[in-house]
Amino acid sequence: MSESPVATGLEERLQSVRESAEPPAMPTEVSERIFRLQGVTEESLTPDFMEQRSLLGLIYDASTQLIRVLYEKGVTDNPTVGELRETLKTARRSPTEQARLNDPTELGKLLMLLAGQMRPLLHVVPELTFGVDGFGVVQRVVLPMRLREEPLRRAYRQAVDRSVIAVREAISSGELKTDWEVVERALERGTSLEDIEFLGERLDGSLRTLFIRPPANDANLAGHAQVVNEVRRKFLFGPLVQSLRQSDMVTVVDCSDLRGASGAFRRSRDLIYVNQPDLLAERLNRLCDLLSSDLFGAWVKSDERRDLRARRSDLPDFIMQSRKLAGRLIEFLEAKALDGMPPRHMDILVEVSRLGELVHNFEQQAKVREEFEELREIVERIRKHGSLLEIKSGDRLLFSEKYTTMLLEGRVSQVLAGTTPAIPYEPGMELALFESIYAIVRHPGATGVAIERALELFQQSGDDSLLFVLEHVLRIDQEPEAELKSYIPPVLLYRLREALQKAYARSLPPLRRFWLSLTSRELSPDQLRNLKRTRRAAEKERFRVRRSAGVERERQRVEKRQKAGGKQRIADELKSEKSAFAEVRRRIQRSWQKGGLPDRNDIREHVSSGAAYYVDRIFKGIAANDQRYQAVISIPVPEEEPIFAEKAYLLKHRERLLADLQKKLAGVTRQVADPAIKGRAGDEARRLYRTYGALIEEIERLGS
């Protein structure tokens, strides 16, 4: 059977709409000539249009007249299709034609002929409404007449705005939610899932009423409907969904990957939900319940459904396993490995697989908002203090460990933080090992007050402890001068450095101190650098001593627990060791992500004192290929400590790591071969040469 002439030009008309920046339209003067002059035609018009030109002309003229009358009355709205039908009742036509004009279905077909041309002679623009009976659609007839500026663009923009208002009213009414108790009762009565309404939280069905359903038994009309729908998709539906998303009224889940397949889900449409996380979380839970029920007995084994229901008490696990099951069933249906699943059941699969990710994102966003609000309150509290705030003293933390760590890691840009002992904070360091932790807002007002207090204390009592705290917290030796002066008054910065010179001079031998005092000289830059280096080493040693004491306390605690004996002791020991291994893995991950190469010493220094007790046992287990530690490997390096890495990380980033290591190896190879590079620099080059070579060899072996 050959294609109709209308169907043959369909793709050309659709492409014309897609490429059009404005709603396409036949110029008014051309439309009038077509209907008033019998011999005039237009090559873009379809044959079925020309066959019914006389009746279409009557509709066009009636629409024109009705729009003019409304305009003269000051009515700004375009007429509805119902108003046009009432106007056409007065037309003098044959009984057959009059019956077609009076019949809403037949009139709709004729309007489709006018609106479905490559250059439509009129547009039928739908608007969503909302009332006591739920959503409805008002269809308005729009002509490109010169009574108003840009009538088509204005009509579509108005339809978008009014539809947004309708959706807002629907959401405010609280009616866009499923009554799950009604669903349960209906299922208990044996009602088919296909006959139960449970799409309350979804708007895609209501929004689809803005489109025309193409008739299945008329190829010509189906083609015209496709053109009309393409116009509505581009100039109404797309802008409407975008506006609803920008207003945070809806959230959209893309299903284009399912439509791209040729299997059972090729007609899947994007899921559009009301943007209410609590309702969507409840919807996901209920859909997972349906998936694990007897409704899916024909496609899911009874023991698998029973196992899924048994996980209901652990909701996150229940949802995760439900999503896995739904994804697996979708794959089977796509591969045509399952037959006979009704559309509503398939809809549940799509929702469970896609809604789960959306709900998870909502939960993460809620956590981020909560964290942001808590951080805002913390920053405000530090700001109101107006100076240096001690946020840890002894065992007392002013803020939670989570937020204190964020301050120390520099993840809160408005705040500077530091510790005593004054050492650079690194992720994983145990807060309990610090004597004190301080914070101050990065602002000249607060830093100025703190410096003046430290200077006053130093001048009156000779106590220099606050000076050294400020040197560490304000990053005096780490930040560029311009950056320092952005949050420290320059005069006070100068005075702070002057006082620090005097404080450092105190650590000189007595005779040298006396000589400096007698000659009124300052420390030389080299002397100051050496004194600072000595102080940093002393601070690092203080921290090491505190950490060793922590490890000793953990050892005593473990020994006490071991003496207790019994199954509980063994369970506690295994739990502690497992926790320590998790901490070791986190350190290894962080180190590799930052370009480091973690060895035993690096790991020991950066895990908590509780985990440090177990690290040697963990190292031995890794070396012995203990199954408990198989996620981590030890890479031997000739004459050096082994490097630790996660297998999964090396395999995932294999190509990047190899390229990076080979580039570094080439660089150190040149240094090793260079006779001018001797001493410590030469030793370091040879160490790196051995290390990079061993890593490349191991990564290549893993990937082979």
Image (cartoon, grey):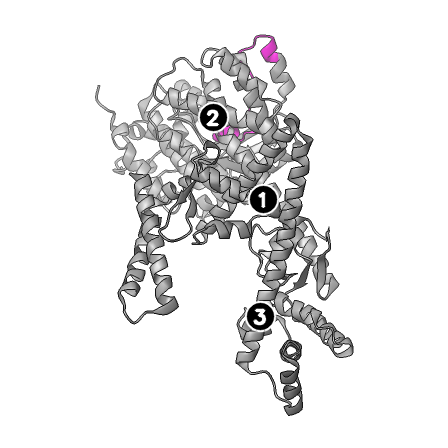
Q: Is residue 26 above or below residue 405?
A: above
Q: What is the tally of numbered marks visible in this picture?
A: 3
Q: Find disc 1 in the rendering and name its residue.
A: 613
Q: Residues within 10 Å of mark 2 (few under 14, many from 20)?
A: few
Q: Which mark is residue 483?
A: none
Kindly identify the amino acid type of the residue bearing the numbered disc 1.
Tyr
In the figure, 176 relative to 391: above or below? above
Q: What residue is shown with label 2?
A: 324
Cα separation, mark 1 vs mark 2, equals: 39 Å
Image quarter (top left, top right, bottom left or bottom right) of the N terminus: top left
Find numbered disc 3 in the image and state the secondary structure of the residue it sits on: helix
Tell which circle, 2 or 3, labels the residue nearer the N-terminal end. 2
Q: Position of residue 530 (x, y in %)?
A: 55, 75
Label 3–label 1 contact, CB within 8 A: no
Quarter location, residue 376: bottom right
- Crowding around mark 1 (Cα neighbors within 10 Å: few <14, some 14 to 19, many 20+) is many
The image quarter containing residue 24 is top left
**Residue at the spot 64% in from the left edge and 90% down from the top edge:** 520
Q: Residue furthest left?
A: 2
In this picture, which residue range is highlighted in magenta? 186-209
Task: Name the one closer to the observer, 361 or 416.
Answer: 416
From what the image shows, is residue 690 above or below residue 630?
below
Dot placed on the residue nearer the N-terminal end, 1 or 2: 2
When asked about the image quadrant of residue 191, the answer is top right
Residue with the mark numbered 3: 534
Which residue is situated farthest in the front direction here?
563
Disc with the residue nearer the chain's start (3 vs 1): 3
